[in-house]
Image (tube, grey):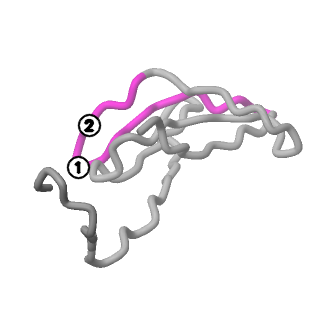
Amino acid sequence: MRPGCTNCTLIVSGTPCPPVVLAIQPVADGRVRLHWPKWAAGYELEANGLLSISTWNPVGPEPRVWGGQFNVTNNAPAPYYRFYRLQKGGP
């Protein structure tokens, strides 16, 4: 922008981004693999044991990129439930 310009307009166009889909699949030894697309960088994986509680906790370990996906392998807590979500991180 030029100094002194006070009448400027910024136009951003393009197609909307597709929604980020978190996938989960069982793997050996009572573990689950959670994965989401690599283009969805900046999202954090969180978990909660009860949907009625609004506190979500970060899930480790840090995701690893493999096959064009972010991947986290985690224990599946039987017989309890665990709910997962992706939360957009900071700016």
- Nearest the viewer among 61 and 33 is 61
* Furthest residue toward top: 61
Residue depicted at 46% across the width and 35% down the height: 90
Q: Is residue 80 magenta?
A: no
**Which residue is located at x 46 percent, y 66 percent?**
19
Where on the picture, by quarter, is residue 64?
Answer: top left
Q: Quadrant of the C terminus?
A: top left
In front of the other: 88 or 73: 88
Residue 10 image point, x, y percent: 26, 68
Q: Residue sitting at 49 percent across and 36 percent down?
A: 44
Query: Magenta part of the protein: which range?
Result: 62-79
**Tag 2: amino acid:** Val
Q: Position of residue 71 (x, y in %)?
A: 37, 38
- Residue position marked by numbered label 1 in the rendering: 68
Disc 2 secondary structure class: strand
**Neighbour class for label 2 at 10 Å: few (<14), some, many (≥20)?**
some
Q: Is residue 75 magenta?
A: yes
Q: Quadrant of residue 52?
A: top right
Q: Are marks 2 and 1 in contact (CB under 8 Å)?
A: yes
Left or right? Give the position of 1 relative to 16: left
Q: Amino acid at mark 1?
A: Gly
Residue 65 marker: 2
Mark-to-mark CA distance, 2 and 1 = 6 Å
- Using the image, determine if residue 36 lies above or below residue 48: below
Drawn side of residue 48 relative to residue 75, left or right: right
83 or 52, nearer to the observer:
52
Callout 1 crowding tier (Cα within 10 Å): few <14, some 14–19, many ≥20? few
Residue drawn 66% across the image and 27% down it: 57
- Left or right of 30? Residue 69 is left
Left or right: 5 with respect to 36?
A: left
